[in-house]
Amino acid sequence: MIKVQEDNYKDYHRQLSGLKSRITLGTAVGMMACMYLVNNYFYGKVIAKLPFEPLSIVSNMSHRGIEGEDFSQVSMTFIYILLQMAIRGSISKLTASEGPRMPIEH
């Protein structure tokens, strides 16, 4: 009886791993395609203006594709990256590819 449950658990875990890898790959391809479209459509356009000048590490990302020396200007690429970081955890929960947090007790 326990051997059958262990086999069922292993099969479930294998199926979940395969599904999770496909969803992760699909999400990555989708995000890269969106990034490409965002970069092409909004290249060189100022989308927002910060009330401060960010740190040098962040200013290189936030000012990407914008000409000029005013580093308080923000490009759409930076906003897209922030949005992507904010919703990445929710995507795995919405697609139910996260799996159980606690292992099944034998």
Image: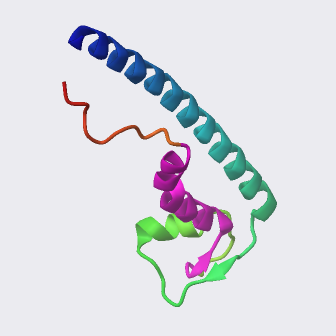
Residue 21 sits above or below residue 78 on the image: above
Residue 70 sits above or below residue 43 on the image: below
- Left or right: 7 with respect to 51? left
Q: Residue at x 30, y 10 (%)?
A: 4
- Left or right: 89 with respect to 22? left
Q: Which residues are magenta?
A: 71-95
Q: Choose between 74 and 66: the one closer to the eye.
A: 74
Percent across and percent down for residue 58 are 46, 68
Percent across and percent down for residue 19 are 52, 27
Percent across and percent down for residue 14 are 42, 19
Percent across and percent down for residue 18 are 49, 22
Q: Residue at x 55, y 57 (%)?
A: 84
Q: Residue at x 48, y 83 (%)?
A: 53
Magenta stretch holds residue 92 = yes
Q: Residue at x 40, y 15 (%)?
A: 11
Of the 4 image quadrants, the one containing the N terminus is top left
